[in-house]
């Protein structure tokens, strides 16, 4: 991959104002973002109208056992077919009509895995949604069209979607007058890049574009100090980097850019930046090869590894993720213990829990996202419970690496309350991006209700179902 600094700060493709005055932009990040509207940056609704869920940045997904309001809708295939026909019959449509049709399409494809039902209409649906994004007739229609594109691509996994949608998405990110639409388009672009056939070159190109947005505090897309857009760019960048195997040459510059965002006045920006830092430190360690011996590991690294659980492959340091880790650790420690009275209790709690986990990984990248880290004073051994997420009524997923956590958060943002349905119904885009689920021990012998029985049947038929075992690490 070409040098990030040269691409970001010297190319004519995306001219960042921070390239001209980095220190001035740092000042804007510390002061301007503090004055930004909190309401504009924290859209946590599960309504299909919302562009994205920024609250999923926080380490708060303990359970995905959500009630599906569509579970008793046996006629949903016909309803979806009617809505698709309505969307494609654009000549007779109005803005309000398209808004209602898109909202229904999002609801149905979110709560049902509809790959078969929409298979023959993917290209035509994409054309209709892209036209709405391009025209930007209303904020609601545009945002719903962006959501619809995301659900279309994650359901169909059509490898032609990226090349057809990317030009329009990039333009709307740069030119829209609405920061909310910019942020939704950034998230949509990320989903199309991952699932729509961008390939390695496309992923790297979009990572550079997103890093430019972050480094310039949104100024490169005319969204100066807008935490919504910056958070979206950080989240999508983190999702994309999980698909990149070797990031050694670019790690130093990327960590520095994310460190700058730790000074933001918005907790969503700070947490998303911190998670990306944790991923980059995690990437600096890879499993020990068969022909490698323990003698190649330094004494210090050997001592650190001695404190780790015996399960899983042994991880070996390959390079320095950042040249001044002690400086970074001090910044992370400050956020993990911050007590600023101007910060809400909710944000303060979120900062504490997230940055305690991020700091743990930076101190030793062999440790993934964990709660309740503790140290035995006699042995100096680190203890901590690996993060697990409950999905449905009978399944749990072990999230012991940051790449798993970031992918889960991204998929949860796209599918919202329909995540479990897509997982259990075999959506390949979801299954291929997450670790294998484990069965929860039976806690009751009572007869399950109809809903529980139906979900249990789906689980038994799932190809991804497995008995108790550790998550696969080959990715």
Image: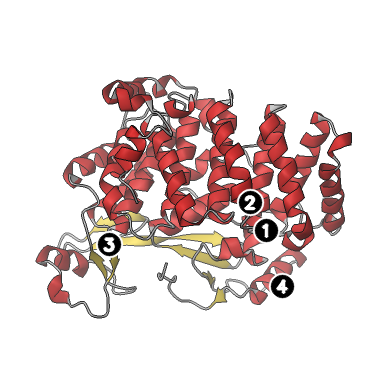
Q: Nearer the viewer, residue 5 or 295?
A: 5
Spatial CA span between label 2 and label 3: 34 Å
Query: Which of the two marks, 2 or 4, is nearer to us in this view?
Result: 2
Image position, residue 48 (x, y; %): 69, 41
**CA separation, marks 1 and 2?**
10 Å
Which corner quadrant of the image does residue 117 belong to? bottom right
Q: Distance between the residues labelled 3 and 1?
A: 34 Å
* Mark 2 or mark 3, whichever is nearer to me: 2
Rendered residue at 44%/71% (across/down): 472
Residue 297 x, y percent position in the rendering: 15, 69
Assign a secondary structure to mark 3.
strand
Q: How far apart are marks 2 and 4 (CA)?
A: 45 Å
Q: Name the residue under label 2.
A: 161
Residue tagged 1: 156
Name the spot of residue 291 as percent of width and height, x first.
Answer: 23, 80
Q: Name the residue under label 4.
A: 447
Q: Earlier in the sequence, mark 3 or mark 1?
A: 1
One can see residue 410 in this view: yes
């Amino acid at each position: 991959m070409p040098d990030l600094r040269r691409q970001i700060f010297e190319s004519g493709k995306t001219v960042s104002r921070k390239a001209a005055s980095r220190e001035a932009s740092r000042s804007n990040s510390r002061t301007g973002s503090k004055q930004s509207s909190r309401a504009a940056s924290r859209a946590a609704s599960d309504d299909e109208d919302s562009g994205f869920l920024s609250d999923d940045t926080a380490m708060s997904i303990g359970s995905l056992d959500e009630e599906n309001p569509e579970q008793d809708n046996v006629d949903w295939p016909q309803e979806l077919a009617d809505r698709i026909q309505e969307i494609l019959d654009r000549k007779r449509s109005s803005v309000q009509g398209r808004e209602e049709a898109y909202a229904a399409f999002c609801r149905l494809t979110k709560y049902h895995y509809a790959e078969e039902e929409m298979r023959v209409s993917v290209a035509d649906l994409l054309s209709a949604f892209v036209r709405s994004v391009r025209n930007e007739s209303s904020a609601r229609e545009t945002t719903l069209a962006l959501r619809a594109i995301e659900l279309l691509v994650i359901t169909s996994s059509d490898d032609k979607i990226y090349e057809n949608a990317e030009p329009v998405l990039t333009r709307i990110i740069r030119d829209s007058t609405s920061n909310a639409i910019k942020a939704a388009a950034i998230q949509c672009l990320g989903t199309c890049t991952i699932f729509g056939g961008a390939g390695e070159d496309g992923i790297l190109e979009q990572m550079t574009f997103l890093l430019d947005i972050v480094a310039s505090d949104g100024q490169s897309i005319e969204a100066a100090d807008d935490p919504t857009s910056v958070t979206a760019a950080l989240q999508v960048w983190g999702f994309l980097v999980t698909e990149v195997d070797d990031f050694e040459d670019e790690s130093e510059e990327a960590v520095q850019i994310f460190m700058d965002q730790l000074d933001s006045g918005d907790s969503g920006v700070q947490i998303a930046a911190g998670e990306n830092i944790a991923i980059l430190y995690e990437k600096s360690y890879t499993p020990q090869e068969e022909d490698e011996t323990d003698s190649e590991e330094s004494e210090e690294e050997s001592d650190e590894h001695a404190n780790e659980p015996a399960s899983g492959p042994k991880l070996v340091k390959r390079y320095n993720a950042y040249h001044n880790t002690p400086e970074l650790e001090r910044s992370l420690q400050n956020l993990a213990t911050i007590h600023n009275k101007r910060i809400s209790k909710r944000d303060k709690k979120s900062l504490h829990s997230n940055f305690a986990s991020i700091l743990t990984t930076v101190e030793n990248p062999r440790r993934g996202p964990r709660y309740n880290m503790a140290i035995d004073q006699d042995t100096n051994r680190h203890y901590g419970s690996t993060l697990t997420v409950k999905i449905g009524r009978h399944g749990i997923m072990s999230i012991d690496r940051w790449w798993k956590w970031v992918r889960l958060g991204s998929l949860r943002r796209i599918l919202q309350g329909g995540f479990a349905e897509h997982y259990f119904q075999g959506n390949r885009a979801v299954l291929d991006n997450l670790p294998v689920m484990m069965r929860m021990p039976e806690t009751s012998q009572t007869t399950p209700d109809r809903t529980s029985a139906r979900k249990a049947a789906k689980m038994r038929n799932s190809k991804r179902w497995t008995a108790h075992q550790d998550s696969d690490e080959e990715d």
